[in-house]
Image (cartoon, rainbow, N blue to C red):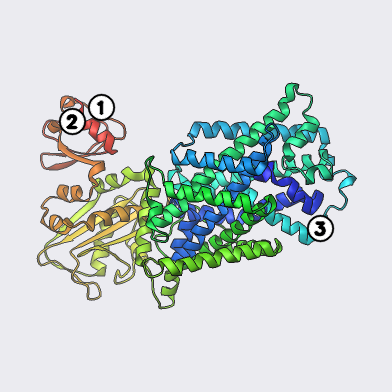
């Protein structure tokens, strides 16, 4: 977020609205809150690479995805080009080279860096960001001390009217500086890599917005108080020019050097990451058949060479054809359009009533906050003038034309909008529900082992005769789980309709019901299997052979869908039905439902790590990594693996753990 918006844009923005420019930054930070909250919701519901493109495609459909993908590509190209103009401007303080020429050279350099596959390491990024924030904080604090806090809110009289161009000009500048906050939502493109996204993504966005808004607003107060209007309005290096006024006491121009270093670090990070991010849009869209497949091919260095090369060429064209002010305005304009569309995406996802849409963070004040976000975005675009309106409209039309020319008819994917239609008696796209289910499974990765633990504790019952209707089934399930939990007959009957028609068919002859309860502490699974003369009577349904009832805690969000997805993955396997119905022991049934990579079932003598520890208490055995002995079978009986239980010869052990830890278990004596 700290790059061109702070180091380059202030002079351009101040030339429009005068000393009220700091207020424009403050209001822009406030107006991005709806966009931040809806992005937090979509990102915690669908933490997938692709960010805005993915959200629009899966909510509004492939045409909106095309507009979002190609439009985001164009917007990031403009924003990155703007950042490299700024980097060139600050480098030109010490290097006598035209700014545009220097920006073009930097574009080519960063393009080559991306092609050769160089990556920013986590530690390097932390060092850059920490250094940048420390320098900016020092600039703001020292500047306020020099200016005086009371005087900072209104500059010296040479600036004239507080709103230089009136209210309309002020609103136009809010739209112009909006691009300064665009980085706030870019976490969506790397959401798959975020640990505990339900908590960390909203928290990270909130803290980033507070930090950026504070630095932008106070930093602008300092600049307009230490620089004369003619100095600020004409400056492409306003932070360095302002620093020269009150940091000159430092030896060897160290104050200015530190500011230039901070600016270059910020611009370098934004420019390099911008090329990387922009090139990933055509790369991802090629995989979805929205642009030619050649854009998804990796080059010699395992990077999307063609996508990066085309992105670099487009950035060079932007630098040659547009001036600095136009680049900033057009980057902001299309970013505003995307923010408005994603606010609409939240409304569509909510109204689709898709059961597998379960965000970890839910934006408040629905739908008024989302509607406000849409109106704010389009209002600011209109106030930015005819150039911004025309550019945004042309990009949208070009993207729509491309979709109908190239992609229409080639893909069979629809967005959540179809589920809204389904509520009106029209179409729906079931593939989206399965995709969201798979996303939720991955999203709660820290609970992965909970699935194996659930299967190992599951209650399994076989029936060979009798007819089972709704009441009999509910009686049986309730009596099975009430000893373990707070679930009662009355609660179950209030949860499921009379014919259990709210079931999910997850395989031939197999149905699953799943619900989350706010007072349930641990997940429970009840499995009923029917053979021979046993029959199910549910509103004419008599072809079911297996019923599964899954009950989970309400937190973390989507846990019920994640576990249901694991079960569905197994049941949909080609050999499942035959293996399932031929299994004669409950141990076999549990093994069939387990995911092989996270489950091991062996006699203790066949486990190298444990065969020499027969006679030891489980609590005294140091298991590798995440490995846990879940259940033991001894002399035909199931034994809970309590800490004080001793291992005995002949024990069959059910062990759960991560794949690499299970490998250690089987390879070390």
Which residue is at 36% across, 67% downward?
410
* Quadrant in the rendering for residue 138: top right
Q: Is label 2 in contact with label 1 (beta carbons under 8 Å)?
A: yes
Q: Which mark is residue 100?
A: none
Which numbered disc flags the more N-terminal residue, 2 or 3?
A: 3
* Quadrant in the rendering for residue 266: top right
The residue nearer to you, when weighing 164 against 463, is 164
The furthest residue to the bottom: 425
Q: Which mark is residue 165?
A: 3
**Position of 302 relative to 65 (above/below):** above
Which numbered disc flags the more N-terminal residue, 3 or 1?
A: 3
Tell me the quarter of the image containing the C terminus.
top left
The residue at which mark 1 appears reads as: 621
Which residue is at 59% across, 32% downward?
130
The furthest residue to the right: 157
Residue 631 drawn at (x, y percent):
22, 40
* Quadrant in the rendering for residue 432: bottom left
The residue nearer to you, when weighing 221 against 173, is 173
Describe the element under mark 3 as helix, strand or loop.
loop
The residue nearer to you, when weighing 195 against 542, is 195
Regarding residue 270, the answer to whether it shows in the image is no
The residue at which mark 2 appears reads as: 647
Residue 383 drawn at (x, y percent):
71, 63
């Amino acid at each position: 977020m700290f790059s061109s918006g702070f180091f380059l844009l202030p002079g351009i923005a101040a030339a429009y609205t005068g000393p009220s420019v700091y207020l424009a930054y403050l209001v822009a930070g406030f107006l991005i809150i709806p966009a931040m909250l809806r992005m937090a919701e979509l990102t915690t519901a669908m933490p997938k690479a692709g960010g805005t493109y993915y959200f629009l495609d899966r909510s509004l459909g492939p045409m909106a995805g095309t507009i979002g993908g190609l439009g985001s590509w164009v917007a990031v190209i403009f924003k990155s080009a703007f950042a490299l103009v700024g980097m060139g401007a600050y480098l030109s303080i010490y290097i006598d080279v035209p700014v545009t020429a220097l920006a073009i050279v930097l574009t080519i350099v960063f393009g080559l860096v991306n092609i050769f596959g160089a990556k920013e390491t986590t530690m390097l990024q932390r060092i850059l960001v920490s250094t940048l924030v420390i320098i900016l904080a020092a600039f703001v604090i020292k500047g306020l001390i020099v200016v005086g806090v009371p005087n900072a809110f209104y500059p010296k009289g040479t600036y004239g009217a507080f709103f230089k161009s009136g209210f309309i000009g002020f609103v136009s500048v809010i739209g112009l500086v909006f691009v300064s906050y665009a980085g706030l939502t870019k976490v969506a493109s790397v959401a798959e890599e975020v640990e505990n996204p339900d908590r960390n993504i909203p928290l990270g966005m909130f803290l980033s917005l507070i930090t950026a808004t504070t630095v932008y607003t106070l930093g602008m107060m300092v600049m307009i108080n230490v620089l004369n209007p003619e100095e600020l309005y004409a400056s492409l290096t306003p932070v360095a020019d302002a620093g020269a006024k009150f940091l000159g006491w430092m030896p060897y121009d160290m104050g200015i050097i530190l500011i230039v270093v901070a600016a270059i670090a910020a611009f370098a990070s934004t420019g390099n990451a911008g090329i990387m991010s922009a090139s990933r849009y055509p790369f991802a869209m090629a995989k979805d058949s929205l642009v030619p497949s050649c854009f998804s091919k990796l080059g010699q260095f395992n990077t999307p060479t063609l996508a990066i090369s085309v992105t670099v060429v487009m950035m060079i064209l932007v630098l040659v054809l547009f001036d600095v002010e136009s680049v900033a305005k057009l980057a902001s304009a299309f970013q505003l359009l995307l923010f408005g569309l994603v606010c609409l995406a939240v409304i569509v996802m909510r109204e689709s009533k898709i059961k597998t849409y379960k965000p970890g963070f839910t934006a408040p004040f629905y739908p008024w906050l989302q509607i406000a976000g849409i109106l704010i975005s389009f209002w600011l675009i209109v106030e930015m003038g005819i150039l911004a309106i025309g550019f945004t409209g042309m990009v949208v039309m070009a993207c729509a034309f491309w979709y109908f020319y190239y992609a229409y008819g080639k893909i069979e994917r629809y967005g959540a909008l179809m589920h809204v239609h389904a509520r009106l008696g029209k179409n729906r796209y079931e593939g989206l529900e399965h995709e969201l289910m798979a996303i939720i499974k991955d999203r709660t990765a820290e609970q992965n082992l909970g699935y194996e633990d659930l299967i190992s504790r599951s209650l399994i019952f076989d029936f060979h005769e009798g007819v089972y209707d709704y009441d009999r089934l509910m009686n049986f399930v309730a009596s099975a789980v009430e000893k373990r939990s707070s679930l009662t007959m009355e609660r179950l009957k209030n949860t499921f309709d009379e014919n259990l028609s709210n079931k999910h068919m997850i395989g031939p002859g197999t149905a699953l019901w799943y619900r989350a309860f706010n007072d349930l502490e641990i997940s429970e699974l009840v499995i009923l299997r029917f053979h021979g003369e046993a029959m199910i009577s549910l509103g004419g349904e008599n072809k079911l052979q297996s019923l599964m009832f899954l009950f989970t805690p309400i937190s973390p969000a989507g846990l019920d869908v994640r576990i249901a997805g694991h079960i569905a993955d197994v049941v949909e396997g080609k050999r499942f039905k035959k293996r399932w119905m031929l299994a004669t022991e409950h141990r076999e049934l549990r093994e069939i439902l387990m995911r092989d990579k996270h489950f091991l079932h062996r006699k203790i003598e066949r486990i190298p790590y444990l065969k020499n520890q027969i006679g030891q208490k489980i609590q005294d055995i140091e298991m590798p990594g995440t490995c846990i002995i879940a259940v033991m079978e001894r002399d035909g009986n199931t034994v809970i693996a309590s800490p004080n239980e001793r291992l005995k010869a002949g024990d069959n052990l059910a062990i759960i753990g991560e794949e690499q830890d299970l490998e250690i278990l089987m390879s070390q004596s």
